[in-house]
Image (spheres, helix red, strand yellow):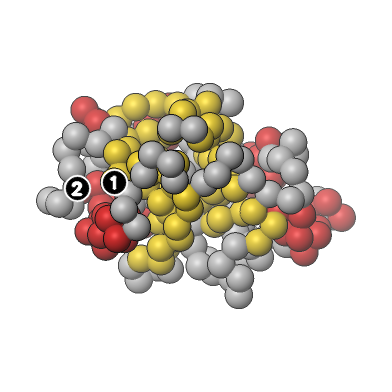
Amino acid sequence: MSVYLKQIELGPMQNFAYLLGDPARKVCWIVDPAWNFQEAWEAAGRDGFSIDAVLLTHSHYDHCNALESREFPKALPVYLHEEERTFAASVDARGLCPRLPEKQLRTVRAGETLTLGSLSIVCLHTPGHTPGGVCYLAGSDLLTGDTLFVDTCGRTDLPGGDMEGLRHSLHQVLAPVDDSVTVWPGHNYSELPHDTLGRIRQENPFYTTFRRTGRDRNLPL
Ligand SMILES: [Zn+2]
């Protein structure tokens, strides 16, 4: 399966948005459109791609505040996990999540496969940072949002966060994913902008420390 994948750093919080697409059909989806939708749209255009849907790893504003912008196309479907949709509309999410465009929302379930041309994109439900956080697995690429960064993982002290849940997500839900898969995180918080899951499992303290001591650690983000 050949994949078009472009990592774009946007905004003041070192967010990564991604263009994920089928190179044969020149169609892509944007993962976590935040801060500057126009820039991502133009980047796709320069590569000869059009964007025809949105995937959200989760609903925090720094990952999807472009949905509120005037230039965001009102026809694009926006996929997110069903629990994230509920969370984003709850009082807990006040101040953390932008208002999502109700009519454009489409929910995905754990284990569901989305099809984009020749690509199969599997939705892995990885709660812990938020209740409906997901990772998207497309062939040998895993887009992890704030569930997992190269050297750390997403914080769990915000409303909807759950350290036990995140531990389960990292060690159980992601367990079937092969070491050779490349992790593409939701922020540029590490020296490397991406890395293999195998190296992350060996070096990231949320794998090594959880495994050794089971002690919780909340690193600052
Ligand atoms: Zn977040």
Does 119 appear above or below 35? above
Residue drawn at point x = 29 percent, y = 39 percent: 52
Q: Does the rendering let one see residue 135?
A: no
The residue nearer to you, when weighing 19 against 92, is: 19
Residue drawn at point x = 24 percent, y = 31 percent: 104
Please state, as top left, top right, bottom left or bottom right, where the N terminus lies in the image: top right
Q: Which residue is mark 1?
A: 50
Q: Residue 82 in the image: x percent, y percent?
A: 43, 27
Is 215 placed left or right of 183 in the picture? right
The residue nearer to you, when weighing 123 against 58, is: 123
Q: Residue 206 in the image: x percent, y percent?
A: 72, 56
Q: Count residues near mark 1 (Cα–Cα under 10 Å), then give few for <14, some for 14-19, many for 20+.
A: many
Outermost residue toward the bottom in this view: 191
Is 76 placed left or right of 32 in the picture? left
Q: Amino acid at mark 2?
A: Phe
Is 48 placed left or right of 166 in the picture? left
Q: Amino acid at mark 1?
A: Ser
Q: Which residue is mark 2?
A: 72
- What is the CA distance from the residue labelled 2 to the residue labelled 1? 14 Å
Q: Residue 43 in the image: x percent, y percent?
A: 31, 60
Is 46 placed left or right of 214 in the picture? left
In which image quadrant can residue 40 be found? bottom left
Does 165 appear above or below 202? above
Q: Residue 91 in the image: x percent, y percent?
A: 33, 38
